[in-house]
Amino acid sequence: MTYLKHPVSADRPARIALIGAGWIGGFHAESVARRIPNARLEAIADPALPAVEALAGRLGVAKISTDPADVLSDPDVDAVLIAAPARFHSELIAAAAQAGKDVFCEKPGGRTVEELDGAMEAAENAGVTVQFGFNRRFATDFAAARKLIDDGVVGVPQLLRSLTRDPGTAAGIANPERIPPRTIFLETLIHDFDTLNWLNPGAVPVRVHAVADALVAPAAKAGGLLDTAVVTVTYSNGAIAVAEANFNALYGYDVRGEVFGSAGMVTAGGPQASGAVSYTAAGIGSATVRLNVDLFHDAYTAEVARFADAVIARRDGAGASAKPGPGWTDARNALAVALAAAESAETGLPVEVSAVAELRAAEPELRAAGSERQLAGDTV
């Protein structure tokens, strides 16, 4: 037989290398390899060779290394996805930028504001795109809540709430002594701080007061563990926000947000796996989600898909048309609140955020009549 010719797109996918083959890195790698049509998983690097080999074998990736420098020097790599431990984030952002690679980096962007600023200065000098992994902005319900805020449904935000309760078991936290100090602020609540900042557009946090303890694993407190925290944040527009976290919710993974304003209220999130509810002799029941990659499956995928679009746009000369986010200012503002909260928990006193860093809003102030705006914040 003779084949008929059929036109196909000549577009090249975003060629992305993964640095960090752990839990969330593995999920992002699957997204690039299997769920995002215009992206290709080009290479994987991680010092733990068995983890790299297992992930590469599952996803059909030929290029693997124990050294991130190999993917940074690879001319076939357009961008890197950094899912390494947080202590390496700023160093890897700077190295990727100097190699001319666009960057998607999991939170936080650095352990200090100075670290983050140094990395982002390198990115700005290189003209590369940097996006941070604040996935809640890409969850359907949180994005819908933000759209309602933009449309003026809640009026001016006055009270905000965000919570993260990690799934747990009756046995408690596994190996609590291995959790670094300040983790609850820098790696858990930092999501809530970004969410609160994003749901209160145009305002910046000015004062933080945190109370935290080891209520799930009291014996680990001597080693620096805090597994339960409540943080109040006062904003420049007068709004007051509360963020809370706990590492051991027996009923499932629970993430929620709420904004109350002068004209109404919006809510988002929850632990339910679906809208199905059972009514039996045992009572009313609903299945709950147990893993972050299940609750935020589509959001994790959507944030990397947006990044892939931005990589292609910059590579092919249309960078101005694609705005990835969250960007530098978003990451910086959330990190500053996290550091202020950690200091407040340690001293028992409120902390002025300006003592940590001078902040600026990532986007214009909310207008009462509503306005059109990008849902994911600023660029780098």
Image: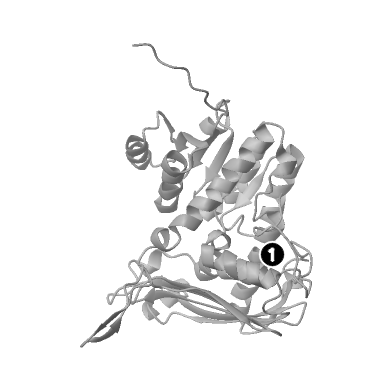
- Horizontally, residue 323 falls left or right of residue 254, namely right
Q: Residues within 10 Å of mark 1 (few under 14, many from 20)?
A: many
Residue 101 visible in image: no
Residue farthest left in this picture: 281
According to the image, what is the colour scheme of the structure? Answer: one colour
x then y, percent, for residue 107? 56, 57
Residue identifier under label 1: 333
Please tell me whether mark 1 sits on a helix, a strand or a loop.
helix
Residue 57 visible in image: yes
Q: Quadrant of residue 364?
A: bottom right
Question: Looking at the picture, does residue 68 appear above or below residue 303?
Answer: above
Q: Camera-side residue: 370 or 199?
A: 370
- Horizontally, residue 132 falls left or right of residue 281, namely right
Q: Amino acid at mark 1?
A: Asn
Q: Residue at x 45, y 37 (%)?
A: 44
Q: Quadrant of residue 216?
A: bottom left
Q: Quadrant of the N terminus?
A: top left
Residue farthest top in this picture: 2
x then y, percent, for residue 324? 65, 49
Q: Camera-side residue: 70 or 304?
A: 304
x then y, percent, for residue 244? 52, 78
Question: Looking at the picture, does residue 229 appear above or below residue 116?
Answer: below
Q: Residue at x 59, y 73 (%)?
A: 342
x then y, percent, for residue 110? 61, 56
- Horizontally, residue 66 falls left or right of residue 324, namely left
Number of marks in picture: 1
Question: Looking at the picture, does residue 320 appear above or below residue 247?
Answer: above
